[in-house]
Every structure is written in structure tokens, then in C-alpha cells.
């Protein structure tokens, strides 16, 4: 198995976990949490989309993140 396939399989397993959490949040009627999760997942979907590598050169991929910890902060979600 290639390294890319291995990483994909890890992400796919986590995506299944997120799906289960979403279903449970719906059951609980947790609309605020679902809204926040939707926004976060939309950002991840944009980030995950394949693109032209040439136009990404030199760009800061960690924009909006705490560069030391890679965490999403409240300020970056506004």
C-alpha cells in the first residue's frame, strides 16, 4: 500500500466517525453544533479539493491557523 493510500484510509475512517457523530447530533436536535460542524466541514472540503499545484506555490497553507499547534481558533472562524 502506498503512503497516499494509507493516509487516505485513515481519513476515510475518520470521515465515517464524523458521519456517525452528525447522525447523533441530528437525533439530539443539536442545531447549533451542526451549524458549527457544517462550517468547519465546508472549509475542509475546500482544502481537500485537488487543485493546480503551480498556483499554490508560495502560499501559506496554514493561513488562519495557530501555526505552532495547527488549531482552528475562534477568530479564524469569523
Image (tube, rainbow, N blue to C red):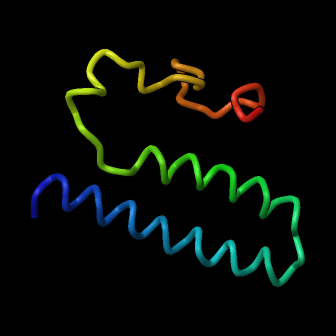
Residue drawn at 88 percent across, 59 percent down? 32
Position in image of residue 14 (x %, y %): 47, 65
Q: Which quadrant is the N terminus positioned in? A: bottom left
Q: Is residue 58 left or right of residue 26?
A: left
Image quarter for residue 73? top right
Q: Which quadrant is the C terminus positioned in? A: top right
**Is residue 46 placed above or below 20 in the rendered structure?**
above
Report the residue that reaches farthest toward the bottom: 27
Position in image of residue 64 (x %, y %): 59, 24
Residue drawn at 39 percent across, 68 percent down? 12
**Is residue 16 placed above or below 3 in the rendered structure?**
below
Image quarter for residue 54? top left
Residue drawn at 78 percent across, 64 percent down? 34
Q: Is residue 35 left or right of residue 45?
A: right
Position in image of residue 43 (x %, y %): 57, 46
Position in image of residue 5 (x %, y %): 19, 61
Q: Is residue 69 left or right of residue 6?
A: right
Report the residue that reaches farthest toward the top: 58
Report the residue that reaches farthest toward the left: 1
Q: Count of labels shown?
A: 0
- Between residue 31 and residue 21, name the one nearer to us: 31
Residue drawn at 79 percent across, 59 percent down? 35
Q: Is residue 76 left or right of residue 35?
A: left
**Is residue 44 placed above or below 75 in the rendered structure?**
below
**Is residue 15 placed above or below 39 in the rendered structure?**
below
Amino acid at each position: 500500500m502506498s503512503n497516499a493510500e494509507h493516509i487516505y484510509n485513515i481519513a476515510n475512517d475518520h470521515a465515517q466517525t464524523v458521519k456517525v457523530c452528525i447522525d447523533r447530533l441530528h437525533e439530539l436536535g443539536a442545531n447549533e453544533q451542526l451549524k458549527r460542524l457544517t462550517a468547519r466541514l465546508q472549509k475542509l472540503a475546500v482544502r481537500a479539493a485537488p487543485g493546480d499545484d503551480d498556483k499554490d506555490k508560495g502560499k501559506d497553507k496554514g493561513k488562519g491557523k495557530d501555526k505552532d499547534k495547527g488549531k482552528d481558533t475562534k477568530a479564524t472562524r469569523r
